[in-house]
Amino acid sequence: MASEGTQAPAPTLWDEFLKLRDEQRENTKGAPPVIKGNRLAQETNQQGLMKWYLHPALKNTVLSTFMFFEQEIPPGSRSGRIRFQGGQVMIILEGSGYTLVDGVKHFWEGGDVVNLPIRGPGIVVQHFNLDKEKPAKFIGVEPNWFACTTVDRSSGFEQLETAPEFKRS
């Protein structure tokens, strides 16, 4: 506390770390540790039919370091085609089809894992359901580069001792 006639000390960037930590803790307080898939709405977007478990715009989750979604491709259909950095892992839940990565077909079926590579200029990806009668479903996860590491760094973040050189002015 500044005494009368003196100025309060300017906050340090270290103080900003502590402030950010407290804000993140407050934002995740009460967030559910389990996200119920049967309670999520399926949206139709440019990529197709998706349910979002974790997304940068969803603020009521314990973790924000991943994007996690379920995608369904109707019988005989396909997803949208995108260019992105890659680094996504897909677990095929059901169905059979293939994924085009930069024009190369990679076939998959239920139980398979598809790793989409990271490439500097990005990759072009599109998914196809080969079954004309049943949908294909997969989950996809990738780092949320918008919030990949929180200040708590998954282990807590506390100032336990101050360096002897530090004197708050």
Image (cartoon, grey):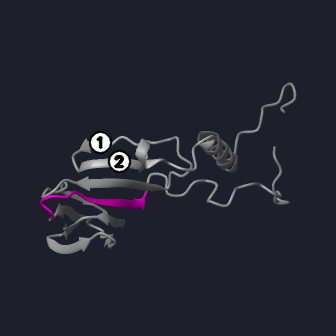
| Quarter location, residue 107 | bottom left
* CB under 8 Å between discs 1 and 2: yes
Q: Where's residue 139, x and y in %? A: 35, 60
Q: Is residue 55 visible?
A: no
Label 2 sits on residue: 51
Label 1 sits on residue: 43
| Quarter location, residue 2 | top right
- Specify the segment rendered in magenta: 131-144
Figure check: 40 above or below 69: above
In-image side of 136 versus 76 (left or right): right
Q: Where's residue 52, x and y in %? A: 38, 48
On residue 138, which mark appears?
A: none
Say how many tags the image has.
Answer: 2
Q: Residue at x 58, y 43 (%)?
A: 31
Q: Residue at x 18, y 57 (%)?
A: 81
Q: Is residue 136 magenta?
A: yes
Question: Outermost residue toward the front?
Answer: 133
